[in-house]
Image: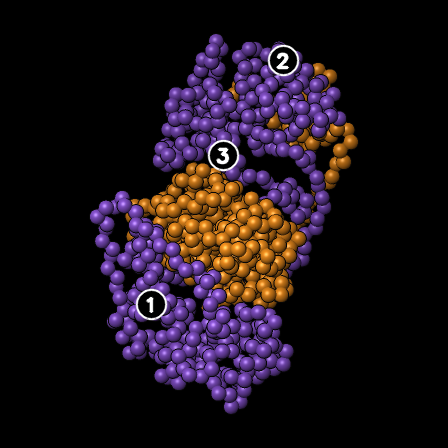
Chain colours: A orange, B purple
Amino acid sequence: MCDQTFLAITFGPCDNCSQNKPLMNIYLKNEPINYCSLCVELMACQGLAKGETTNTLKAESESLKAKLEEERAKLHDVELHQVAEKIDALGQFVMKTRRTLKGHGNKVLCMDWCRDKRRIVSSSQDGKVIVWDAYTTNKEHAVTMPCTWVMACAYAPSGCAVACGGLDNKCSVYPLSLDKNENLAAKKKSVAMHTNYLSSCSFTNSDMQILTSSGDGTCALWDVESGQLLQSFHGHSADVLSLDLAPSETGNTFVSGGCDKKANVWDMRSGQNVQSFETHESDINNVKYYPSGDAFATGSDDATCRLYDLRADREVAIYSKDSIIFGASSVDFSLSGRLLFAGYNDYTINVWDVLKGTRVAILFGHENRVSTVRVSPDGTAFCSGSWDNTLRIWA
Amino acid sequence: MTINTLSQDGVQRQQMPCLTKMERMIISMQDPDMGIKLRNQRLLITVIPHAMTGLDIVEWLIKKCSISDEEALHVGQLFVKYGYIYPLKEPRNLILKADDSSYRFQTPYYWMSTRWPASELDYAIYLAKKNIRKQGELIEYEKECYNALHKRINHTWDFVVMQAREQLRASKQRRKGDRIVLECQEQAYWLVNRPPVSPEHYKLTTLTKNTIIEHNRISLARNRVKSSICLESYVKYCEQYQPHDPIMQGCLPSNPWITDDIMFWNMNSETVALPTKLRVERWSFSFMELLNDQMGRKEFLTYLEKEFSAENLCFWQACEDVRHGETAKIPEKVDEVYKQFLAPGASRWVNIDSKTMEKTLEGLKRPHRFVLDDAQMHIYFLMKKDSYPRYLKSELYKNLLARAIVPQETKKSVFPFMRRQRHSSPSPALATQTAEDDGKAKYSNSNSGTASRL
């Protein structure tokens, strides 16, 4: 350290409680002493109730985990970038902002595309959910939610309704009416009820069922008409932040990622956790399936995106770079699966070559965190939403 | 990222893992051999040691991470924003300028990871020090914060004032240069941080240890596939779909978002008379691609009718409707399916093996969403293995492929800066409202004359 003028002990045993913690230098009776921040607060308030923390030891599950890793490693005979050596590298990559959608009064938290490939729904911190025709940048519908921080929104497959939710712990479905005089909030259907914030929601193949994930650590499948809980999924030990439905033939599984650093694959029929992956070093913010359904990508606070293969049952690629320090909030694949678009908390979007593992381009433009990135259904463009209150369409 | 600061077993979660990464970089920046060269900087009449210029920082980042100017400036900005580097000339302006403006590294004592969250007590002591040292030195918002804190943590005020006095007295005994540096550091720290409100609460929770162990045992027993096989499949998939990926290879006639011309969408709509070649080719990639395209499904149905096996596709569609439809209508839908497809002597009887048929009929006594799953899967795989490959070899498919359009690339506009008018399209909400009024079925129509509603 070059700052020779002020050498303070910043970490070590507290003079009061003797625990190893970050220390503060304070003066007591003209003498400098080192207390941890908790002891300082205690001393100042003289009477703050001190809680206790507990740590559970998982010795048996640790050894099982080690064995599991061993088994996985046995079949790992080649790395992805080695297989990708024979493919041509991608050329110069040019993507520009083609549309900027302005209209939200606060941070944009989530967005989804309509199947007609041009309409989108977006939700923001101020409680507003707006349906846009992104091509013309016209706003078509607006709904004001009774809560702020609408963290999840989804477009129904038919294009006739949108679902949204957030800090109200619910997921509500609003049928979209073209009658200008009709208040959309009047026909709202309250579908899901969780015990903590709603982090993500998605319609299954029809307008009739919704899959939700929540800060209470569970995911759930709901019937829209009756609001009935069809299946619940327990297995995460912390908030679940994101989910994605598998594009498989049998259409029965989905993947979820959460703050316990795990990505879990679930069977929708039985509610069982079928597969689990835990290699990230921090919260998983977003999960997305590879277009073939055989793999999925995750974006995490540890500033990496990773690719997990379901058949090999392991992580097969890490997308990271020294200069990328901030977490990835959202990821999505291009139509062919060759490109991975990832939005980061340092306001940029990085484009990765999925097969070679290299970064193809970095896109600047947003003036605050990028909170959501989604590729359009026909792959012609992708949309990014940000805490700078705007959405951008890139192509 | 989540609002919850504790994990389930009551341990404080690591906040902001980006800080660890930033600190690693900051430390390597200060490496005596490979780091940034530091020099003394004159500030008014005092000399501040170990300072560097903004340009030094940007250049070091470019060399170390092999990135562009723009990205290096961007990363450097983040260091200033989070308080790891602070400017000397204009301390309140927390930005990085790639010129000869001076910056210093913040001491680890004041790093965000060491002192986060910045406590109210600290802030109160800092403001009290400023107030005592020179009357009127607190600026507007600081005065407001000071008053608010005085109200909020009034019970600690004796301690606050005592500490402020002690720290001022201790600092007077330091050398002037040191004192200025310390003041700069402290000021930079408080400019970056805003003290949040809450003290820490701890609570106890338990982990379900047994389910984790059980889960790991099941995972051990799973069948896995070799990496080489899995990874090769990605390469094949990407290669196969690359011509269909507009971002990778462009699309004909043109990408609507770039040229403001919606021909591409019009030519690929569901109701177009003649499809494009790429679209028809895509049906041959997998059975799911064929079924996911409404036009493909219709074509396939036409083919199956010629083969007298159209009831298979209709059955599959009916099962999908049960699986994804309203819960309340399941019993009646299942009943319809039974009458049309499964009952002995039914008009559109489907050929399922006896074991599956038995199991399904048994399940029909208590109909639920997934009761038809086994039968549906059986028919699906039957079509996939038998009818689908034959369809791809059939005259019907080959003719369509031959007739399919390859769109011309849109000629570049003579006046490229003139924006084309962007036409709006009818909202899907409107389209289905009229459809519901007509009482049409939710899935695609069949061409045969038999009843299409289920």
For the residue carrying disc 1, how many other residues have a C-alpha within 10 Å: few (<14), some (14-19), or many (20+)? few
Protein chain holding label 1: B
Residue bearing the label numbered 1: B272
Residue bearing the label numbered 2: B135
Q: Nearer the viewer, mark 1 or mark 3?
A: 1
* Residue B297 position in % (x across, y down): 39, 73
Instruction: Tell me the kind of residue under disc 3.
Output: Met
Q: Which type of secondary structure does the marked residue at label 1 adopt?
A: loop
For the residue carrying disc 3, how many other residues have a C-alpha within 10 Å: few (<14), some (14-19), or many (20+)? many
* Residue B286 position in % (x across, y down): 38, 69
Instruction: Tell me the kind of residue under disc 2.
Output: Gln
The circle drawn on residue B121 is none
Q: CA distance from mark 2 to mark 1?
A: 79 Å
Question: From the viewer's perspective, is A92 left or right of A240?
Answer: left
Q: CA distance from mark 2 to mark 3?
A: 38 Å
* Residue A49 position in % (x across, y down): 76, 36
Q: CA distance from mark 1 to mark 3?
A: 55 Å
Locate the N terminus of chain B by quadrant: top right
Please tell me which residue is depicted at 63% across the width and 24% down the height of the picture: B144
Residue bearing the label numbered 3: B22
Q: Quadrant of residue A36?
A: top right
